[in-house]
Amino acid sequence: MVLLVVAVLGLGLLRAALFEPAAVRDDAVPVVEAPAQTEAGQCGTQPVRANRELRGMWLTTVYNIDFPSKPGLSEAQVRAEYLKWLDLAVAQHHNAIFVHVRPSGDAFWPSKFAPWSNFLTGRLDGSDPGWDPMAFMVDEAHKRNLEFHAWFNPYRGTQPAPAGAGADLTKLAPNHPLRTHPEWRIAYPTGKTSRLYFDPGIPEARKFVEDSMLEAVQKYDVDGVHFDDFFYPYPEKGEDFPDSASYAKYGAGKSKADWRRENVNTLIREMQQRIRQIKPWVKFGISPFGIWRNGGEGSDTKGLESYSAIYADTRRWVREGWLDYIVPQLYWTIGFDKADYAKVLPWWVRTVKGTNVQLYIGMADYRIGEKGDWSDPAELDRQMQLNDKHGIQGQIHFSAKQIRGNKLGAVERYRSRHYASPALPPRMAHLPAQPPAAPSITGAERAADGSIVITTAPGGQATSWALYRTGPDGAALVSTGRTGTAVRDPKPPSGTVTYCLSGLDRSANEGPLSAPFTTTGP
């Protein structure tokens, strides 16, 4: 499984050893203690505090790594599997899920731009499964108060055979855009692992790719648009990506490397602009390879550079404010000589400082159990402690299957130390804000399962709610939910308890608290 993940998605663990290093530097970075909690007002006389961090997992569909468990399942089976993944997210106290809805020029929704994904249908011919998985997935995530981030791969058009069409045009669906627009397609690399790409250097192809992804933003109530680390392909077999024709036509005197970087920059900039025009509250984020450049203005590392190898100028995206969040994949251990987690992390902290771009970290749950430092179940826990010390605003874990597997007890370990209680997503001050008016608590009743169910009167147009319970150290967040779902304290103490309730808008801006409500139980 690890080798498959590396071949398809992975990269951080092997790429770090591929390139010769540039000169490195060793800047000292001051550690900033993370504000683990943020003030949310007063519940009576007690201060109210809530954890504010993004917590999520990647739910990977390519090669059916996570979901669906195999191609061609029935609608009922796909629905049931997805609900189990959401149950896992809720049990982990996550507040977001990142679902792979365009793994390779295809779609997990009825699209006029792309054929249906064969990882859903089990067929390469674009056959319609007869239902809309995307609508179901977004709706069910929201019922559980999970943000739904739609995860797209922009340029990939196929996956290698036999799971995908590879570069075999006869296997493409009749409506596949790379069949109808042969001038847009590039096959890379040669041989059995070849796949088709949309040529990033052709403006019409780029516009089509953008339209393909933005269709989902227009049609569905997604909370975020998400890319991973795939832009220009990672170098293979010493072959150069064969885009000489488009470079000759559109290069405009730039070096090929600068031209390629600008092609990717244009995609990122235009996506950000167009998302804002369609739905200004939708977040745009990318999870790039963890090394921008080695040495100099880059990190103290000796590995592959996204800047020069795949033409992803990730630092510029942050500085230009083209992203709302960035999630570098730091898939190395603390102390790894070519890319030390403890050295790469502070570089990213410096990079986002003074911008509106929030920094989350991509966590390598999939590596737990490998030989060496990854055989220690405490490695991810230690990395998350460093994240807290540096004020990191969240984590996304790769991937869902590893979270469920809990190899060596590593997931249970970091959950108990870092995700033991619920958290609200971080606020993004530059997104639209409409904090709702204070709701009212009108009653409370202890249910047969021991929980306390709260009855409320809404105070405004809230997207979600947050319930606080007073205690010896202040009022703590005990549960959250989507507006319209039951307000419940799942594990209340016995005796007298006091609650306050707030509403949040869809950008997680919290309105004022209700008046305290005290109830007495057994």
Image: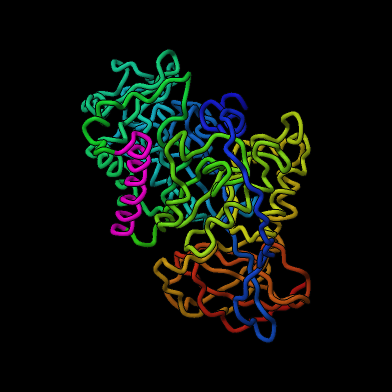
Tell me the residue at 72%/54% (across/down).
385
Residue 378 x %, y % = 77, 44
Can residue 167 be seen at all in this image of the molecule? Answer: yes
Tell me the residue at 38%/31% (across/down).
156
Tell me the residue at 25%/39% (across/down).
208
292 or 146, which lies in front?
292
Quadrant location of the C terminus in the rendered image: bottom right
Residue 130 lies in quadrant: top left
Residue 75 x %, y % = 43, 34
Q: Is residue 349 above or below residue 76?
A: below
Q: Is residue 349 magenta?
A: no
Span shown in magenta: 254-278
Q: What's the colour scheme? A: rainbow
Q: In the visual, does 165 lie left or right of 20?
A: left
Q: Is residue 118 above or below residue 342?
A: above
Residue 442 x %, y % = 57, 79
